[in-house]
Amino acid sequence: MTSYGETDDGKLHYRPMTRRVVISGAGPISALGVGIDDTWDAMCEGRSGLKPLTCFDPGAFPCHVGGEVDPETFKVRNVVPKSYRKAVKVMCRDVELAVGAAVAAIHDAGLKTPGVDNEDGHVIDPDRMGCQIGSGLIAADVQELTDAFVTSLGDDEEVDLGKWGVTGMENLTPLWLLKYLPNMLACHVTIVHDCQGPSNTITCSESSSALSLGESMRVIERGAADACLTGGAESKLNPLSYYRQTCAGRLADSSGLEVNDVVRPFSTEANGTALGEGGGLLVLEAKDNCDARGGRARAELLGYAATQSCDHDGMSATAEDIAAAIQNALHSADLDHESIDAIIPFGCGIPSVDAAEADAVEAVFGERAASIPQVLTVPFTGNCNAGNGAIQVSIACRCLETQSLPARLNTGTIDRNLQVGPAEARDAQLSNILVLSASQGGQNTAVILGKIS
């Protein structure tokens, strides 16, 4: 593998990408809490964050259960510098979650930035700190749109596009668009923490976090930065996003079900997923930089790959393409399938997506698939979409650090020869963990994390 970079003579030269990349901080945010400690403790206790929804009335939709971040636990005004609090007015929910996750990750990494410690400033040169964040296609607040649409009605009481263009749009706040652009997550995070290195936004549904992580990995490997904030965050707990997911046939029907029975990954009774809000940011860092500043690496990023499935039915997952991502990630890590000690699949509860993941795992690992423990996050947090992969990776880091696995929530009948049924938290010998995602848009990712040696 090669890349190029500027050398002392000012010219670009090809060079091997040999820098080791580690994760030095994990900052998940979800219905389980803020930060890796709250998240890990809840999963080890087998305590799900899914509850009946209260943030809006879901009565018209099939699924009435979701993973809401506790408003008393997290308030974005409490995690931004006083000088930046005016900007909270133009932060939609997704941005708020990303900003909160960034602070949690920076604290976990033992870093200091202007957004965390205004007096001490940077531990890492701002020019050497990048930021790649996965985002969803953010839905605008229904009330804001309604207030504008109601002034655009014609004589027939229908929205008149002519009136909308002349008067309706004028009833949106001047900075309305800045609340809802997908790149605003990375925008606010980079401003708060003064990250002046390479920055990007990736909007590929559930694979957004892992795709962002992969880009951060390459940025550090090629020497364009020494560290990056990476991951993703999203909230689809709003009427517009909920409607879209319902139309796509991805939501479970929660009628008559107990809360813990709504999301049943790989179960014959599974009928869809439940949504959560949240995600997480990670501090990716060159190992040499982490060591030099006295940081603590949580896990090493050994392999990464992405593939694309064709989308014919809105479910966008094929076993062949997921298996190809796994094989390519193993190749990039210079490992074989015997080296994988645990898997954290997407495991969302959508039958066709689960089946594709299960088929892919069985195709790659053969008879070993039945003996590899799997960790499920969606029954705890709900499907956090663009932020889901960051939660998975955060949990993988803690598994490797503690040499243990959290509890596994799942109900129903499992007819696959895979370790995906209910289980208690337990110790385990873990050297390498595989993390998978399969997105609604057809992007599949495989990430391999290794124990620090």
Image: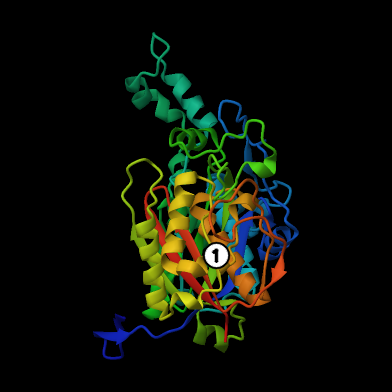
Residue 51 % position (x, y): 69, 41
> Which residue is label 1 attached to?
370
Please name the residue shown 60% across and 45% down the image: 263
Please name the residue shown 61% across and 27% down the image: 59
Label tally: 1
| Amino acid found under the numbered disc labelled 1 | Ala
Q: Say whether residue 326 is left or right of residue 63.
A: left
Q: Quadrant of residue 81?
A: bottom right
Q: Secondary structure at mark 1?
A: helix
Q: Quadrant of residue 305?
A: bottom left
Hey, which residue is sitting farthest top in the picture? 155
Residue 216 % position (x, y): 43, 70
Residue nearer the viewer, 351 or 311: 351
Image quadrant containing the N terminus = bottom left
* Residue 114 in sight here: no
Residue 251 % position (x, y): 52, 38
Hey, which residue is sitting farthest bottom in the picture? 8
